[in-house]
Image (tube, grey):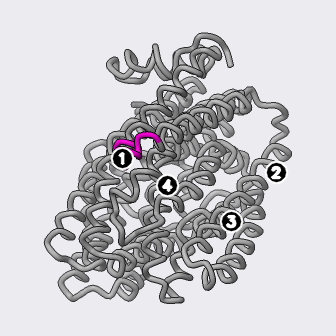
Amino acid sequence: MSEGGGLSAGELQRRAIRGATWSTVSSVIALPLAILVSVVLARTLGPQEFARFAFLSFLVPLLFAVTDLGFGQAMTRAASQSFAAGNLAATRDLIGKALGWNLLRLPIVSAITVMVVRPDPVLAAILVGSIVASNAGSGLLFSIQAENRGAVSAKLAFLAAVTSGISSMVAALTGASGTTVFVVNLVAGVVIVPCWILVANPSLRRAAMIPRMPRALPDAFWRYAITALVLSLLSTLVFSRSEVAILELLGEHQALAVFALAFGLAQRLTTPVDTILGPLTPALSAIAGAHPDRMRAGFDRALRLSSTAVAFLAGAAVVGTMLIAPVLFGPEYAGTGTAFAALAVVSLLRAAGQPYLALAHAIGRPGILLRANIVALVVDVALAVALIPPLGVWGAVIANAVGGAIAIAMTVRATVVASDLGRVDVPFVRLALLALLSSAAAYGLGLGGGEIHAVVGAMAAFAGGTACFVVLARLSGGLLPAADADVLFDLLPARLVRVARPVVLAPTQAA
């Protein structure tokens, strides 16, 4: 841990990779629990109450983002740059202002959340208490982000996810409503607030607990913040479960429940890769400010890692998940598996392209993402309104998939032009072929095993897709250049290295 600020390009890269690695490891470990939570909630709540839970899970985080006005994203960028440059005084000042901002907006956030959730008085008091605790400790969170300590953030996020998941299941199994389960889920995550105090850098901890008025901020701070806010909202509406709002308005609760489950599975499929973006954005921002000559190398490495991980997930997990979904959720949620497969394609493409999103933020060009998401949202909403009434859940699936694909394509193209990237050193064609061939093998084995039992077919698909991908990857020369693999091997726990080296990450030759 750096006490006085100032991070070299090598240290920034190491922290980014460590953060991404721990985020991925913790997400993989938490994935079975997340799926178990979905199964328990869906089966115990039923479509009607599960639809209510899913609607609140979409709407409340969106409202949190609106009331923040993009301040958090802009502050993370500014604080990470000042700390990387060695300006500890400026970092302390920024962290104090971040805390001051969150305390100022606290009454608004609390009032809006209670109005939307409409809990009983006791639950309302607990809900408000959790919001107060998280906002009051937010300066500590900003101090961790300023140092690019993504590994610490990942471990704490894992703790919050486990606590929230277990608490939600207990609430559902005891007969709680969808609204109550949502409140329990939200409140349980506050368990990480005391942890922020323990892990915060002593040189920043005091400043993180003394609020300052959020004024005299860096140049163009609010311009970046508002742009980031609009972008975040648009991205959420395009790539998240925004269709649940239209389904809710139309009273399509059964379709809403199926869509929410399918979308949730698609998001969980790419969770290990999605976690890369968390530590990657502040890391690239810091490198852009302190070591701009090293940014291209960092971007290329991140793109190779995300693309390789996505190819593996596509070949190993999509077909098996599609086949096991009917067994997990039961006949009340018929169609979840096939809807998942369609949504998984866009989720995988977005995960692979996350380094482009981080790069656009790092070079201060969020307008690129803004334009792409505006176009995508218009198409998404138009298709949802037109297709949901006649097609139900598949209208929502089509709208989400088309909107997401448009946003991805426009973002990649515009970022390449704006940053003058040129050709990137990633074997996209080979990775796509590995994924397609592995998926085909998984589907064939799944159909064969399904003649015995659906579970047998799903397990055969998982095993066959994984084995096919591993064998084809090794026969075609490995997946990653030696330098990329060595960085991961230096950071992974020894037991994981022993598994990874001879299998997926074996750097038999440069890509």
What residue type is disc 1 on? Leu
Instruction: State the image coordinates of residue 430 (x, y, percent, origin top left).
Output: 70, 28
Task: Give the residue pinned by disc 1.
Answer: 31
* Labels 1 and 4: the sequence-earlier one: 1
As displayed, is residue 353 above or below residue 384? above
Disc 3 or 1, which lies upstream in sequence? 1
Residue 267, numbered label = 4
Alpha carbons under labels 4 and 3: distance apart: 25 Å
**Looking at numbered disc 4 in the image, what kind of residue is underneath it?**
Gln
Span highlighted in magenta in the image: 448-458
Label 1 neighbour load within 10 Å: few <14, some 14-19, many 20+: some
Amino acid type, label 2 = Ala
Q: Of the residues tagged 2 and 1, which is closer to the observer? A: 1
The residue where tag 3 is placed is 227
Q: Distance between the residues labelled 2 and 1?
A: 33 Å
In the image, which is nearer the foreground, mark 2 or mark 3?
2
Q: In this view, does 270 lie to the left or right of 433?
A: left
Is 339 on the left-hand or right-hand side of 320? Answer: right
Mark with earlier residue (2, 1) = 1
| Residue on which the image places disc 2 | 414
Q: How crowded is mark 2: few (under 14 residues within 10 Å), some or many (20 or more)?
A: some
Secondary structure under the numbered disc 4 in the rendered image: helix
Q: Position of residue 364 (x, y in %)?
A: 72, 51
* Tags 4 and 2 touching, CB below 8 Å: no
